[in-house]
Image (cartoon, helix red, strand yellow):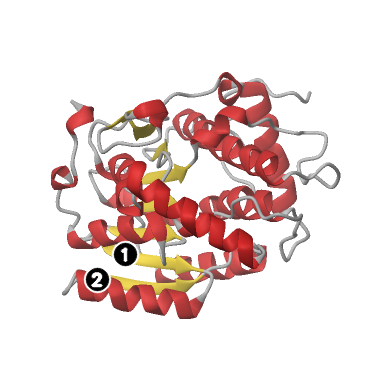
Amino acid sequence: MSGHWTISDIPSLAGKRVIITGANSGIGYYAALELARKGAQVVLACRDRDKGEAALASLRREAPGSSIGLEQLDLASLASVREFAAKELEQRRPLDLLINNAGVMAPPRRMETADGFELQFGTNVLGHFALTGLLLPVLQQAAAESAERPRIVTIASIAHKRGKINLADLQYTTGYAPMKTYQQSKLANLMLAFELDRRLRAAGLPIMSVAAHPGVAHTPLFSKGDYSAMEKIARRMLGAAIEIFLNTAADGALPTLYAATSPEAKDGGYYGPQGFEEMRGKHIGPAKVAAQARDKAVSTELWHRCETLTGVRYLEGSEAGSGLRR
């Protein structure tokens, strides 16, 4: 029964290659730790090299003898995404697991990526959309060389339940509100994970697209950002309370690990903690999906918009939903 799954149920991952975005802290860090302990070759894909180096040293101390590497990746720059993907493709090594984990949460003022996109949509959504498409060849290589299907795990959030896809202004050039924009990005993450699943299956590719959310966990997302000194203190206090009453970052990584490794995880599945309002708990199972996340027409249109904005197109001949455009 999936609710009783624990880290000890993760099988040996010897020989498996894993990329985790934003793995220098929080959920990504603890997911990397447990996957490395199980024998996976883990690549930390981090924006800040210094923080990545510190995380790498810490992980090697906690998981001695493990295979962990570091590569620089800034999801807020499509040039960085392309450079990272090009290096991966040049190595011609199969990729068994891609965990799209990194994220930006609710900066108090509207900010933009290097490409001029609103920061949360550009990082959380467009950066990962482009990365996934560019790495698809090495995921397909893994599918061809192993009996086990590669997985793409997208980290969403219970915040998606209040989200709305603002097709008229995805970048919130007007009416920016920190949480509203974050909620849209997490809804978009979940919708694109479902759309990716539909397209992979329509194309007959043996690759899984799965999503997960951590509930409410104490991660650096609560405290890092452009906040006043008083706000940072308040957010650190909130984080401490979350860790006591809800989830630690290590607990928050459990749904990610379940989605990444459990044989019970299903194509197009969405998983999270089963505690109060899905906010806490170490028992992992199917998560609740808001009705708007199941809208195939909007999902198809969102996919097309992401292709146009990033210039990365993939699985184009695998239309699985009825789009808004004709």
For the question of whether residue 150 can be seen, the reply is no
User: Residue at coordinates 69% horizontally, 53% vertically from top-left?
Assistant: 310
Residue 264 at least partly seen: yes
Q: Quarter of the image containing the N terminus? A: top left
For the residue pair 191 and 229, the one nearer the viewer reads as 229
Is label 2 in contact with label 1 (beta carbons under 8 Å)? yes
Is 143 on the left or on the right of 159, as rendered? left
Quarter of the rendering containing residue 2: top left
- Label 1 CA crowd tier, 10 Å (few <14, some 14–19, many 20+): many
The image quarter containing residue 166 is top right
Q: Quick one: SS at disc 1?
A: strand
Residue 61, position in %: x, y?
A: 22, 76
Percent across and percent down for residue 220 are: 48, 59
Q: How many marks?
A: 2
The 10 Å Cα crowd at callout 2, few under 14, some 14 to 19, many 20 or more, is some
> Rounded to the nearest whole Å, what is the CA distance between mark 2 and mark 1?
6 Å
Helix, strand or loop at mark 2: strand
* Sequence-first tag of 2 and 1: 1
Dot 2 amino acid type: Ser
Residue 185, image x, y percentages? 62, 42
In the visual, does 274 lie left or right of 71?
left
Would you name the residue on which mark 1 appears?
42
Please give the name of the residue rendered at 74% of the width and 46% of the height, measured from the top-left corner. 308
Residue drawn at x 32%, y 45% is 260
Q: Residue furthest right?
A: 174
Identify which amino acid the numbered label 1 is placed on.
Val
Q: Can you give x and y, in whole percent of width and height, for residue 217 in the image?
A: 41, 47
Quarter of the C terminus within the rendering: top right
Camera-side residue: 121 or 194?
121
Which residue appears at 36% of the width and 57% of the height? 95
Give the labeled residue for mark 2.
Answer: 67
